[in-house]
Image: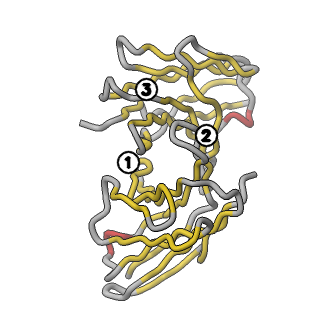
Amino acid sequence: RKEVEQDPGPFNVPEGATVAFNCTYSNSASQSFFWYRQDCRKEPKLLMSVYSSGNEDGRFTAQLNRASQYISLLIRDSKLSDSATYLCVVKNFNKFYFGSGTKLNVKP
Amino acid sequence: DAGITQSPRHKVTETGTPVTLRCHQTENHRYMYWYRQDPGHGLRLIHYSYGVKDTDKGEVSDGYSVSRSKTEDFLLTLESATSSQTSVYFCAISANQGVEQFFGPGTRLTVL
């Protein structure tokens, strides 16, 4: 079983839409959680860390549910520039485990 | 952007040849990581380092070795390249455990 699982998508949404991604993880002892964004043929870049109480950064909201072992990312008022692949990342001890990513296409 | 460079950025080589990829950082971060990224698999950890001369295996370490003789450099060696090692290789750094990683621009390796 994979450490981290994500729906690969693609999610095709119009500009201005709200879209949500979920990610599940298998190790209940996981300590830290992140969302990264990766543009085509580029390196992943940190979008936001995910805290137990949930956190928001502008149009982006991340939630963690330890009991059900999932992480979510909500994007409000989608922009064309949000088109990318979103990677869910979970840290266990010294190692980071990446989901395969969810592809988002925002259309005009 | 974090100061991480990778070299070479692109390489084509033949099966059976040794290949060394270099990751260089200017952030003085303690932790360095090598990943490979393949379609359908996401990023998978090959090896990581938690200090000079301190390294450990990741989930896909077979066929790869690493060395870290200086804080700023982390080398990944494919001792005898195979076609299954054709991939995009990313180096990452982090200051401490539990904090975010920053990635280099990647190396596209093709093994013919």
Q: Which residue is mark 2?
A: A37
Q: Which mark is residue B62?
A: none
Residue in the picture at 36% in, 72% down: B65
* Amino acid type at mark 1: Gly
Q: Which residue is mark 3?
A: A23
* Amino acid type at mark 2: Arg
**Neighbour tally class for label 1: few under 14, some 14-19, many 20 plus, Cα within 10 Å:** few
Q: Earlier in the sequence, mark 3 or mark 2?
A: 3
Separation of disc 2 and disc 1 at Cα? Answer: 16 Å
Label 1 vs label 3, nearer the camera: 3
> In the image shown, does A1 or B55 lie closer to the viewer?
B55
Separation of disc 1 and disc 3 at Cα? Answer: 15 Å
Secondary structure beneath label 3: strand
B79 w.r.t. B49: above or below:
below
Discs 2 and 1 lie in a common subunit: no
Q: Are marks 1 and 3 in contact (CB under 8 Å)?
A: no
A85 w.r.t. B112: above or below:
above
Residue in the picture at 74% in, 29% down: A79
Residue in the picture at 48% in, 30% down: A32
Separation of disc 3 and disc 2 at Cα? Answer: 14 Å
Residue in the picture at 62% in, 59% down: B104
Chain containing mark 3: A
Q: Quick one: quadrant of the C terminus of chain B?
A: bottom left
